[in-house]
Image (cartoon, coloured by chain):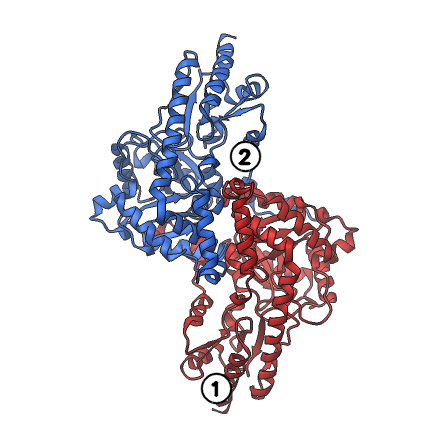
Chain colours: A blue, B red
């Protein structure tokens, strides 16, 4: 019998099941109040709009095209619509600067594949989106800590990367309401990051999955828009690659995301996709395009009204029920609040107890740290919980944490 | 300005545009008769069946699930239906042995990622499916020639691989009506391949994209079925990974394919998919499942009737119009006939002339050879051409070749 481990490539050893996916299963247990899932509330999906456009596609002249193979760069009308949306946030892009992916997760995988040789360094925040670490891990990189607005010099990054056996290839971050912390990088931090990337001569991967979901405060231009301001507006001279998603605004089940950037990079990614899965679903790209053209802003408005209320509700409940020594972020958008427990308290141990007694689920923060730190942190999602669940769940969790700190 | 080439990973240098994709554009030129595209005839897509199931999904209780995130291994009812189909061709598999991919192309990419370290050797036929070479290329392998039924010893493969700086990791082939040759490996050849793989202790990747499309002759059990016969039926002791597709039977635009094999391998691939694109489109998997459950055999029957007639028509036209010195395969299924021109005649040069004078398109065979040989070969597809186009196109091509051989 074949000893598979012997013939697997070394990169396959990096593939590990995420505990978060396991936690998502708790959503189906009626006795548990779950703040674990980072998924959109299905009650907000534009079902009727999708029903109507699929029906239209099947009745119209493009039905054969919808079911046929199509080009790897993606459906042109969707890329045109995206170019219009990008212009609204300060990013002047042509369709050739826009590439359709099967969710923005695929964009992260492709960027890892494009940039990372084994032992190259990726700069990521501590904590960062777990799915980005999983995507990049397949290409066997090292990680170093990105601190937007911080004071690490280019030289220290360069030296650490050389010592690790490679070079710094990119800085990855979510600048708006990030997963997992909900925090936003301010304009000064973004400018400083552009300086750092320029000095290191590396790419910036801007994960904009939550960017449309701002509930209050003033919008900050995307990093790519700030870079365009610096260089006179020529996207083909930029180093920032903007990764967007329809999963948080329209629906994740269609698997349609996108990337915007320098055409030199986009062309490479298109070739990569041609070899990797040919193209994203033709019919789903058409459906997303029609729904977006007809009512993207209205749909986003609907979601924002619900999620912002849930965020307010969770922040109020935390204020009311959390004992001293626990602190949390105050996100201006997105789906997440990040809790820091008293030093020494362990999020994973707390979860185990919580599932037994308080019957509340969340994600221990440790999984989001490339260096395995962050044991005393938690990620709480408010996207799928109603007011009552939030009030009850935070109350029960507060009681548990209070008893732990007393103990 | 960033020098991108400096920060791209070395694997990115393997990404090249395929000339075949360029040739596909000729399908839209009304003055050209094209036998180039290896794509299904959209006139045969089950449009009404798809229209009906999408409508049903949107009206039913699973609409939220259809638009939501789902599990990386794929939609369970579809995996159950596939288990039933596999049983019919001698492959006893549980749903845990079945994994849904975004087209079988994605399966090939994942297998490259799972098995190949740079300089490892992949065994492929000369010629082989170009998309497989493109998928594997990203992982920087070497290739050695697989000759099913041939006499290369395991030692010569092992030595050549070691000399190339790695080890043999798998044998890849399409055993039924392969792209590009249309040829089928007989049972003895499959058994011999199983012996070779066992002696080399490597995996076999069985690309079964065309397997359902047999027009005559007796079906030969899949390689995975023959391996199961040898080991008493335990799929978790097999080394063959079977890659299937709905692109040639139902529709490619939904991007739904599948893999069947040893659960140890499937589990790794599921983790890989989780990190690479989370999962294939939920709604499309549901739609494929419903259409397949209700009428897969009828749909395949419809396609086979049309394609087998076109194959007959093309074979008759070749017999009628090709000059001496030209030979071709007689496929029992699939979409392709493979022509061998007189030695010294160049397929690419012939194509250039043909587009000028005969106005007939095909694919020069060289692209399908990992070693760059095969200059005097052509791939002709009959899937999208009607009788009249075939008669006219082959006649004009025959005249051109005759004038070339005379010259």
SS of the residue under disc 1: helix
Q: How dense is the environment of label 2, judged by Cα within 10 Å: few (below 14), some, or many (20 and up)?
A: some
Determine whether, in the image, residue B175 is placed left or right of residue A277: right
Is residue A356 something that shows in the picture? yes
Residue A262: x %, y % from top left: 32, 51
Q: How dense is the environment of label 1, judged by Cα within 10 Å: few (below 14), some, or many (20 and up)?
A: many
Q: Which residue, as the protein is rendered here, is positioned at the far bottom?
A: B406
Q: Is residue B262 above or below residue B297?
A: above
Q: Residue at x 52, y 8 (%)?
A: A407
Per the model, the C-alpha gap separating discs 1 and 2 is 60 Å
Determine whether, in the image, residue B354 is placed left or right of residue B209: left
Q: Residue at x 68, y 56 (%)?
A: B200
SS of the residue under disc 2: helix
| Res. B400 mark | 1
Residue B119: x %, y % from top left: 53, 55
| Res. B347 mark | none
Determine whether, in the image, residue A93 is placed left or right of residue B7: left
Q: Is residue B308 above or below residue B265?
A: below
Q: Is residue B363 above or below residue A80?
A: below
Q: Which residue, as the protein is rendered here, is positioned at the far top?
A: A406
């Amino acid at each position: 019998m074949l000893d598979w481990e012997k013939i697997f490539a070394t990169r396959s050893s990096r593939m590990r099941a995420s505990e978060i996916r396991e936690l998502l299963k708790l959503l189906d247990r009626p006795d548990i109040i779950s703040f674990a899932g980072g998924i959109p509330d299905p009650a907000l999906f534009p079902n009727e709009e999708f029903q109507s456009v699929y029906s239209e596609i099947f009745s119209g002249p493009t039905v054969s095209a919808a079911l046929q193979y199509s080009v790897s760069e993606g459906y042109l009308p969707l890329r045109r619509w995206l170019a219009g949306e990008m212009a609204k946030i300060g990013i002047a892009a042509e369709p050739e600067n826009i590439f359709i992916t099967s969710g923005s997760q695929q964009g992260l995988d492709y960027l890892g594949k494009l940039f990372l040789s084994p032992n190259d360094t990726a700069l990521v925040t501590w904590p960062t989106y777990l799915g980005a670490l999983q995507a990049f891990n397949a290409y066997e990189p090292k990680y170093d800590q990105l601190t937007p607005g911080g004071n690490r010099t280019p030289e220290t990054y360069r030296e650490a990367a050389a010592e690790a056996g490679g070079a710094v290839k990119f800085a990855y971050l979510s600048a708006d309401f990030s997963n997992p912390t909900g925090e936003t990088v301010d304009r000064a931090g973004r400018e400083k990051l552009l300086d750092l990337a320029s000095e290191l001569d590396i790419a910036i991967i801007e994960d904009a999955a939550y960017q449309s979901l701002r509930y209050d405060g003033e919008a900050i231009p995307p990093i790519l828009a700030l870079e365009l301001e610096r260089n006179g507006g020529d996207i083909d001279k930029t180093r920032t690659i903007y990764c967007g998603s329809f999963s948080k605004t329209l629906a994740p089940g269609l698997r349609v995301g996108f990337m915007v950037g320098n055409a030199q990079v986009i062309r490479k990614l298109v070739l990569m996709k041609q070899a990797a899965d040919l193209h994203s679903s033709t019919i789903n790209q058409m459906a997303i395009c029609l729904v977006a053209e007809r009512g993207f802003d209205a749909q986003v408005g609907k979601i924002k009204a619900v999620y912002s209320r849930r965020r307010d509700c969770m922040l109020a409940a935390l204020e009311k029920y959390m004992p001293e020594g626990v602190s949390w972020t105050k996100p201006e958008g997105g789906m997440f609040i990040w809790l820091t427990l008293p030093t020494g308290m362990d999020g994973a141990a707390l979860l185990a107890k919580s599932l037994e007694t308080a019957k509340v689920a969340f994600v221990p923060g440790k999984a989001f740290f490339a260096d395995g730190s962050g044991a005393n942190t938690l990620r709480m999602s408010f996207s799928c919980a109603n007011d009552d669940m939030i009030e009850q769940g935070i109350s029960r969790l507060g009681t548990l944490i209070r008893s732990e700190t007393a103990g």
